[in-house]
Amino acid sequence: MAHSCLRHAFAARLFLSRTDSTLQISGQVTRYREESNGAQALQSAHEQWAERIPGDEGALWEWCLAQEQSTLLELLAYCAGRTVNAVQMKHDRTGEPRLTHANALSTALKLDMAQWFTPTAGNFFSRVARPIVVKSITEAKGTPAKRSWEKLRKSELAAVAEHEILGTGWLPEPLRA
């Protein structure tokens, strides 16, 4: 019964935007601004669950009570996964507890971010300093920097980086295993 109550509270919070459960579960759905394989997979999973579960809180409660444990575990895993916030922001410091926990979770799950994220001009290279862009290309390709890159505007260099890194599996430092 406690397990059904937990899943009901979580699902009501994520799918019905209900916050008045007797269980004081506080989880915020993490939303991603950029498109990625991971964001698309989360959206697809959300749509699949939204079709499966009732849109009414009372019906959701009854639905949870009637489900097999495997279904409820899948729902709990999805709900918990939607609340993970491992996005490193500019203001985050080294050793930030949230990010330390995210790294531990990633290690435990053997998460390979190369399956879920590809750095592009829009989601990474245009947001970091030129030396980081150049270093990224040289790391990914295993070749020295080209002198011609120094003459490029930042937006052009970001586009070059996106093209050069595509298919290499290279990831920015915070996403590496």
Image (tube, helix red, strand yellow):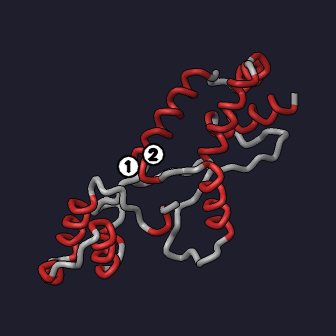
Secondary element at image label 2: helix
Density class for disc 1 (Cα within 10 Å; few <14, some 14-19, many ≥20) is few
| Image-quadrant location for residue 132 | bottom left
In this view of the protein, can residue 64 be seen by the observer? yes
Query: How many labels, in total?
Result: 2
- The residue at 75%/24% (across/down) is 69
Quarter holding the N terminus is top right
Residue 35: mark: 1
- Of 6 and 72, nearer the camera is 72
Asked if the residue at tag 2 contacts the one at tag 1, i.e. Cβ–Cβ closer than 8 Å, the answer is yes
**Side of 1 where 78 appears, left or right:** left
Q: List x then y, in percent, for residue 25.
A: 77, 46
Asked whether residue 58 appears in the rendered view, the answer is no
Name, please, the residue furthest toward the top. 66
**Residue 168 coordinates in the image, percent (x, y):** 31, 57
* Residue located 22% across and 76% down the image: 154
Quadrant in the rendering for residue 60? top right
77 or 175, nearer to the observer? 175
Q: Is residue 153 above or below residue 118?
A: below
| Residue wearing tag 2 | 39
Residue at (45, 45) in percent of width and height:
39
Q: Of the residues shown, which amino acid type is indicated by label 2?
A: Ala
Amino acid type, residue under disc 1 in the picture: Glu
Q: Is residue 154 left or right of residue 170?
A: left
